[in-house]
Image (cartoon, rainbow, N blue to C red):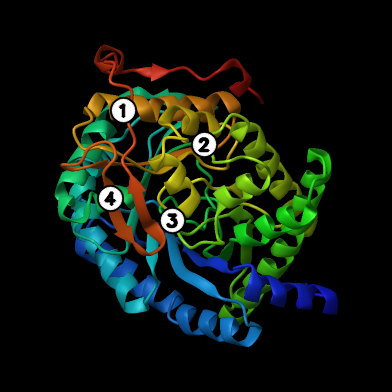
Amino acid sequence: MSLSRREILETIRMTEMENLDIRTVTLGVTLSDCADADLGRVCDRVQHKLERIAARLIPTVNEISEEFGMPIANKRLALTPLSMVGAACTDRDYVKLARAVDDSAGRIGVDFVGGFSALVHKGMTTADSEYFDQLPEALAVTNRLCGSVSVATTRSGINMNAIARLGVILKDLARRTADRDGLGCAKFVVFANPVEDNPFMAGAFYGAGEAEASVSVGISGPGVVAHAVRTAGDCDLGELAEIIKRTAFKITRAGELIGREAARRLGLPFNIIDVSLAPTPLVGDSVGEILQAMGLEFPGAHGSTAALALLTDAVKKGGLMASSNVGGLSGAFIPVSEDHVMIEAAANGALTFDKLEAMTSVCSVGLDMVAIPGDTPAETIAAIIADEAAIGVMNNKTTAIRIIPAPGKGVGEMVEFGGLLGRAPIMAVNPSHCHAFIRRGGRIPAPLHGLRN
């Protein structure tokens, strides 16, 4: 793939003036060959493999960033779900395995490593259950490690037993990291219909059908799209969709060039480019600003779901025009704490919890980096997860929940995470009880349209 002179000049302008960056170059690594009955051997094999394959990741990506003049914000690893890697062990000490992975990630120098994960959307093995028991401690005692759990798919339905346990687990994880405003919960995602090639954290893991190792890229670019929308002026929405689509095309072309070059220099296959508008707390790097440029006072105003649907669809179409390797989530992220306009909208009441949930039906993920009162019951948290899973299952799309019950804090107070994770006002949740519903357990069956062959 090569860029024309005009595309190169446009990329330079987008980088210098509109906050275009590559949000992450993520190296996926298969760990299934590290399984063994002896946990010590598993930890040694995992560390040896990661440090061998990823040894040149950081210097290579830094060299490319400098040579191409393109900021690359993060370098990350995505791994085979560790619940599977540890399943063969006689002693399933997932905390020890988590520490081993985290230590290797520190020596390699990556920002985050995803894959402390389990896939339990249809049922749970004994190993999965032990993983659940140890999940809060593992994420609390590690620095770079991120985790995720798949609780639902359109094909299998919704595992309500797993969801009920996760309500309790999230409360425990928040308590263990209370000195950091429940930061442990920011490193954990609950999924419906997860994708196995997602380069973004905290939900990245490396699927069973992937290559031995490969390179994926997650781009950003909300500032570029916001600039394009403002420049478009008073055009109609059909024209605006076309402008966003063309802008996403340019961003994707630039991002894939970086990804393919990283793969070539590392001697690995290029996997996918995730064409997602991923905001940061910086002014000028916000999906909320795009919605405002489209004509909304704040995200959460009536019309927000329609505007976000247009944006997500146009970004996907532009990415697919530009590359045959579009994958991951691809669309628009609406994390509350990581977008300064979303933070303001939640703080001033324009964006309510219920409206945010409605918007997740058309964004590329779901309830992301949402802080709620620390005294929210575990059953209510489980019900929130179930609602979001139902949106994913019924719409045959990925939805995710990254929610933080902030210990000791209530509605209107702020949690502070810093960096890309930002800060968030604590949002009110519906106080009505749902305990009896959650305690029924079982599995919500797959919808009719999931039974395809």
Q: CA distance from mark 3 to mark 2?
A: 16 Å
> Mark 2 = which residue?
193
In terms of secondary structure, where does tag 3 sit? loop
Label 3, label 4: how far apart the Cα atoms are: 19 Å
The type of residue carrying mark 3 is Met
Residue 261 lies, with reference to residue 41, above or below; the image says: below
Question: Sequence order check: which comes first, mark 2 or mark 4?
Answer: 2
Q: Is residue 293 above or below residue 34?
A: above
Q: Earlier in the sequence, mark 1 or mark 4?
A: 1
Dot 3 corresponds to which residue?
201
Question: Which disc is residue 382 wearing?
Answer: 1
The span from disc 2 to disc 1 (Cα, nearest Å) is: 17 Å
Q: Nearer the viewer, residue 226 or 218?
A: 226
* Residue carrying label 4: 415
Viewer-proximal residue among 395 and 8? 8
User: Residue 84 has which mark?
Assistant: none
Q: Residues within 10 Å of mark 1 (few under 14, many from 20)?
A: many
State if disc 4 and disc 3 touch (CB < 8 Å). Answer: no
Are there few (<14), some (14-19), or many (20+) residues within 10 Å of tag 3? Answer: many
Kind of residue at disc 4:
Val
Is there any visible trace of residue 335 in the rendered image?
no
Q: Residue at x 22, y 51 (%)?
A: 181
Q: Amino acid at mark 1?
A: Ala
Q: Within 10 Å of the Cα at label 2, are there few (<14), some (14-19), or many (20+) other Cα atoms?
A: many
Q: What x and y, as percent, mark residue 254? A: 70, 69
Q: Is residue 379 left or right of residue 286?
A: left
* For marks 3 and 4 on the same chain, the one whose residue lies earlier in the sequence: 3
